[in-house]
Amino acid sequence: MPKKGLGIRKSIHGKKSKSSPAPAPPVTFPPKISADRIPIVKKDGRQNSSRFRSTNKTELTKLPPLMSANQKDRPGLFVQKVRQCCAVFDFTESLSDLKSKEIKRSALNELFEFLKDGSQPLQPDFYEEIVNMFSMNLFRTLSPPADPNAALFDPEEDEPTLEAAWPHLELVYGVFLRFIETRDFEVTLAKPLINQKFIFNLLSLFDSEDPRERDCLKTTLHRIYGKFLSLRPYIRRNIYNIFHQFIYETEHHNGIPELLEIFGSIINGFATPLKPEHTRFLMKLLIPLHKPKSMSAYHPQLSYCIVQFLEKDPKLTEPVINGLFRFWPNLNSPKEVLMLNELEEILDVIEPDQFSIVQLLTMNLCCNQTVPHQKRLFKQLSNCLTSFHFQVAERAIYFFNNEYLISLIAENPKELIPLVFPALYQSSQTHWNRAINNLVFNTFHILMQIDNDVYQQCHEQQKELQNKRTEERKKQQSNWETLEAKARANPISNFVELKKPQSYDAADSKDVHGPVRMAGEPPSMQSGMRRKSVLPYHEATLQALSSYTGHSLDSTASK
């Protein structure tokens, strides 16, 4: 006998249902998607709100105009309007609370005009009300990025996520800045309100994706740093922590350019001699900021800060250049161009006595060996001159258009010209870009004007090295022919095919663009390891190119 109540359901009237229960629909599960194949869906709109949707609906009542009120009633009406502006609205719903949003916007404009007018002095109760209004509107939890994969975001091409509540936030920033810049602003009354907690919350907003808000934050923090002397060490320490976290932990922060711009003006006000704290900041944080991949986003501000330090203390030139070489990129050509730009800016402010020290920097190799008197600066410049990336080579050649650098080379041509001449000679012979060849020839003309004797001596040395390599190659070929003759004397050679080794010396080749030949011409020796711009030799491909007049190499050469 079945148990009581099993398989029986009651109807809405409380009686037992005689009909059998309807079968439950089958349970289906969505197909599993691999974690590495989950598509990233970008939002259509690039606006976002950093505040959660508020459930409390606030209705504002329009108050009398502030500037039209009596002088006695203005302070009280000012406080009422400030408290009215503490209400926060949800801007993700564009059609909600339109009346209240407009009342708040109008009140913020009136507050700005009242502070701008300056006819009424600031009352002591204004300070707490304005700081509280600023905190209520701005101190918030920032929304996560629209694209969780930061590597897909390109600041030069992609549009940032804008703050939806910016129409109100912009006015709040304006009111607060006007409040701080008022003539009768008293720091002693604002000290209990604008404290370390306030600065910490303010600095946390620098990670906002909206560049408009970061620009307002930059101005606000700069004004606070200038007026509140007791908060300066705390502001610097917190910025140090942000830089440290960005370099060694996350490598993601939206406000690095603005913070560096603030520090550029702070460094400009440092007293000399520099304190050990400031020197540590340069070596431990500013120099390692060259390491992250996103350096291009803040490099102009970073370069300005470093140049400011060198103008304050020229003795820091040697450790700074050593630090740049420690983080010099090997495979990132755009980053290398930026580093060359910064290196030239450093050379523009370098002192002649410091230049003589820099050119004697030693270079530590991977095997912990030290090359004595290795000129690190010009060694790195020579490596850039021989780079196959034309922008890197072009930027390195432009160093010789710098009049100050040429004057420094002219003071010691016998030591410096031989350091860069081999790289220039190799680039003139082997570089694939003809524009680079023309720039190198112009550089040769500049070096000849500096010291023609040293130039001719270096040129003869390169020719001797080239002739020496030619002789060594002929000797290797003769040894191979001797070895091949002995191998053919062996009876086993009748059953084995003997092949000569194929080699191509780019430094001795007069063909700048590689050993490519037309059909019908004798093929040159092919290289087992070739440059990227050198195509492999294939008769069918060359025959097809020759038959097609639009891409004929002969017609291209004639042009």
Image (cartoon, grey):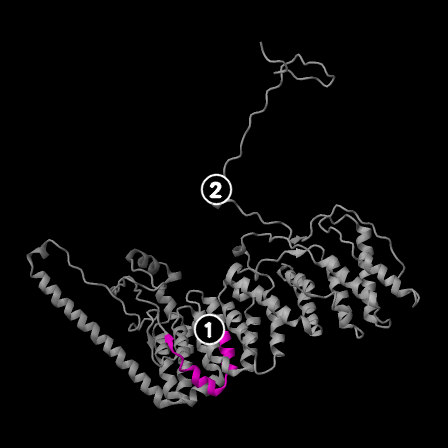
Structural distance between the alpha carbons of marks 1 and 2: 43 Å
48, 536: nearer the viewer: 48
Assign the C terminus to one quadrant of the image.
bottom left
Q: Position of residue 486 (x, y in %)?
A: 9, 64
Query: Against 292, is 471 above or below?
Result: below
* Nearest to the observer: residue 88 or residue 341: 88
For label 2, the SS is: loop
Magenta stretch holds residue 46 = no
Residue range in magenta is 341-363
Image quarter of residue 530: bottom left
Disc 1 designates what residue? 323
Q: Position of residue 166 (x, y in %)?
A: 71, 58
x, y percent for residue 546:
33, 60
Q: Which of marks 2 and 1 precedes in the sequence?
A: 2
Residue 34 disc label: 2
Most foreground residue, 101 or 155: 101
Q: Is 372 on the left or on the right of 253, as rendered?
A: left
What is the tally of numbered marks visible in this picture?
2
